[in-house]
Amino acid sequence: MSAEIRLSDALDRVKPSATIAVTTKANELKREGHDVIGLGAGEPDFDTPDNIKEAAIKAIRDGKTKYTPADGMPELKEAICAKFSRENGLTYKPGQIHIAPGGKPVIYNAFLATLNPGDEVIIPAPYWVSYPDMVLLASGEPVAVQCGPDVNYKLTPEALEAAITPKTKWLLLNSPSNPTGAAYTKAELRALADVLLRHPHVWILTDDMYEHLVYDGFEYWTIAQVEPGLYDRTLTVNGVSKAYAMTGWRIGYAGGPEKLIGAMRKVISQTTSNPCSISQWASVEALNGPQDFLPERRAVYQQRRDMVVEGLNDTPGLTCPTPEGAFYVYPSCAGVIGKTSPSGKVIENDEVFAAELLEQEKVAVVFGAAFGLAPAFRVSYATSTEALQEALKRIHRFCSNLS
Ligand SMILES: Cc1ncc(COP(=O)(O)O)c(C=O)c1O
């Protein structure tokens, strides 16, 4: 008989990622031969641009296949410093840059390096599913602040002020947001910065992963740029995954104060060590190379967003705000809760809604409760226009058949 392994208490505090679960379930149904449309995945359907792929192939041919410094190689740190200066007006030295295998580990390394039991992290909800669980794994306490459609899914200065306690260690900002696509204007960040200036013990982790995916000419700002007085306690996180369609390459990065970056270096040096050397060379090309494909892709995403928002708002029981960015929309399904599907199932909440939609119409979306704000669901429009049109038809049929 094999012995039962006792798992860690920290692991007991977390749940598996709901977004990955939806994608797995949708793939399972596809393998069984069902015609499933997956609107659950959080990755671009575009390919990594060729010049970036070529840079990786060259790196392999040139033998750039060995360990690099644990938190990234100097050439990529230089490219990141240049990016922060060029696009965000932020001055960082290479010693202020942390590079890890994806944006996710950058954030986790920051929490591991700074959180002690009882430390609170303010997380505006709806939030990216991984934030609270990363905080919990690192022994901290996530403090979710509800930011519903009435406030355009954004944290208000009043709600921030009310959430801050002596135990607050971090405020986590994510603009444009996964799952809502909401992005903060300069004036909105200014108002939050005014609150933060009054609370010097609160650090700010801003996750700018979707920076390049903004629409209708939206002007992008990050908080340390809006209020230089916060620079010394802000970690500005970004990465190549979404803008450059490089999710599989696993490169994320951050700029921040040297002491924090040094602590994060200690974490990465004893855990993963350096991110893949080849992916780092590819990322140098991504950041330093031509950027002209970005507006082209942005235009395609914007068309899809408009089509999806219109289609969802035309569906009985759904209301969908128009977000500023990312490739997600977050419709409320409050209007269908309590109704019954033709199979006799009562739509008690958004989790049942998403499960029935997948079961009946083979459309995979992620239910809102997973992101901390219900009843709603997340639609990713990072898929072909044809697939989106068909999905909208099916969602419309599903909701119209509820009684
Ligand atoms: C808001 C947000 N931050 C960070 C990440 C992580 O990106 P990466 O794939 O680089 O770890 C994601 C990916 O889904 C995300 O949506």
Image (tube, rainbow, N blue to C red):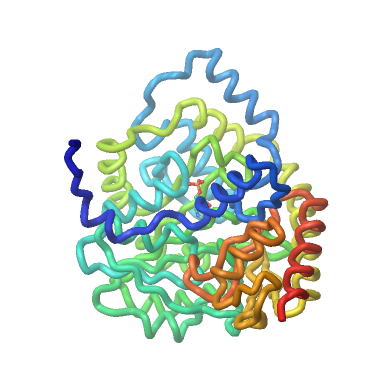
Question: On the rendered image, what quadrant is the C terminus found in?
Answer: bottom right
Viewer-proximal residue among 372 and 49: 372
**Quadrant assignment, res 314:** bottom right
Residue at point 36% right, 56% down?
134
Residue at point 45% right, 19% down?
65
Residue at point 40% right, 48% down?
106
Viewer-proximal residue among 130 and 230: 130
Residue 90 position (above or below residue 347): above
Q: Is residue 11 found left or right of 33 in the rendered image?
A: left
Q: Residue 267: x, y in percent?
A: 27, 43
Viewer-proximal residue among 337 and 231: 337
Q: Residue 321: x, y in percent?
A: 69, 75
Q: Residue 93: x, y in percent?
A: 41, 44
**Quadrant assignment, res 304:** bottom right
Q: Is residue 167 found left or right of 305 in the rendered image?
A: left
Question: On the rendered image, what quadrant is the N terminus found in?
Answer: top left
Inspect this view and state whether residue 221 appears: no
Q: Residue 344: x, y in percent?
A: 64, 74
Total number of numbered labels? 0
Inspect this view and state whether residue 215 appears: yes
Residue 288 position (above or below residue 167): above
Residue at point 77% right, 75% down?
400
Q: Is residue 281 found left or right of 264 in the rendered image?
A: right
